[in-house]
Amino acid sequence: MRPSGRAPDQMRALAFEPGFTKHAEGSCLVSFGDTRVLVTASVDEKVPPFLRGKAQGWVTAEYGMLPRATHTRGQREAAKGKQSGRTQEIQRLIGRSLRAVVDMAALGERQILIDCDVIQADGGTRTASISGAWVALRLAVDTLNLASDPIRTQVAAVSCGIHDGTPVLDLDYIEDSSAGSDGNFVLTGDGAIVEAQISAEGATFNEEQLLRLLRLARIGCADIFAGQLKAVGR
């Protein structure tokens, strides 16, 4: 039995609240259980310098945690004068995940900036960010009335790990902090793998366990894909 009482292949309560903020072209409050992330997508009608004149767009992301997103207050990274390595890793992952499903030429010479702000953390903040970011991106692109849809398919992410010897889906903080192995899977709506990050955190894993984690990730992402489509009205 998992600490939460969930079955090994059961997601936490999943929710997407689209249009959560007033001003952004696309926004979403995403909840994976008690983890909540506010995601906004902003359209900028110019591209970074390295893409000027190349007739293509760009999608990038920033990620941060509010000071009391966790059990104790964390110092704002702005106050420290620099981002942590963890923050930089996560925002690069979010950007890569979204760019994997976007046709940059169809987007045109514009940039979409995704902001992921964790307001409450209980494990899986990066996976919730990626999954909510797709919703915000979809809503932002819909405001552009482009001749060709630049979003080829959906993208979602979920954590999986081995807890007390059992492969489990969508780890919360209690499981994540004590898992023998844990990782994150980023999958697309057409079945492709964007990224798989998994490592031993005290106990190694074998090939069959790795494949079991991937199968669990596909189960979880199927639920996320359904929630995303409902959120954007498709």
Image (tube, helix red, strand yellow):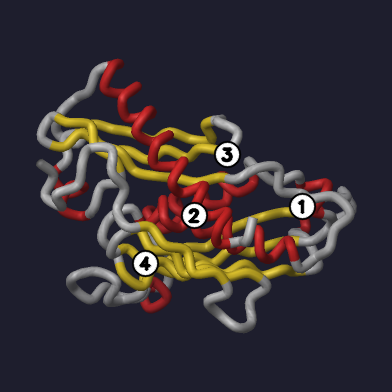
Query: Which residue is at 65% across, 58% downward?
Result: 138
Q: Which of 211 and 99 is in front in this view?
A: 211
Query: Which residue is at 66% across, 64% downward?
Result: 139
- In the rendered structure, which amino acid carries the disc numbered 3? Gly
Picture quadrant where residue 100 is located: top right
Dot 1: within a 10 Å radius of its alpha carbon, few (fewer than 14), some, or many (20 or more) residues? few
Q: Reading the chain from its start, which is encountered first: label 1 or label 3?
A: 1
- In the rendered structure, which amino acid carries the disc numbered 2? Gly
As measured in the structure, the alpha-carbon distance from the residue carrying label 4 to the one carrying label 1 is 34 Å
User: x%, y% of residue 129?
Assistant: 46, 58
The residue beneath circle 1 is 50
Q: Which type of secondary structure does the marked residue at label 2 adopt?
A: helix
The residue beneath circle 4 is 36
The residue beneath circle 3 is 189
Comparing labels 1 and 2, the label whose residue is closer to the camera: 2
Dot 3: within a 10 Å radius of its alpha carbon, few (fewer than 14), some, or many (20 or more) residues? some
User: x%, y% of residue 25?
Assistant: 68, 73
Query: Which residue is at 69% across, 62% downward?
Result: 112
Query: Which residue is at 41% across, 58% downward?
Result: 87
Q: Which type of secondary structure does the marked residue at label 1 adopt?
A: helix
As measured in the structure, the alpha-carbon distance from the residue carrying label 1 to the one carrying label 2 is 36 Å
Question: Mark 3–mark 4 contact, CB under 8 Å?
Answer: no
Question: Mark 4–mark 2 contact, CB under 8 Å?
Answer: no
- Farthest-out residue, bottom: 22
Comparing labels 1 and 3, the label whose residue is closer to the camera: 3
The residue beneath circle 2 is 227
Q: In this view, does 203 lie above or below 95?
A: above
Q: Viewed as shown, does residue 149 lie left or right of 37?
A: right
As measured in the structure, the alpha-carbon distance from the residue carrying label 4 to the one carrying label 2 is 15 Å
Picture quadrant where residue 72 is located: bottom left
Q: Reading the chain from its start, which is encountered first: label 4 or label 2?
A: 4
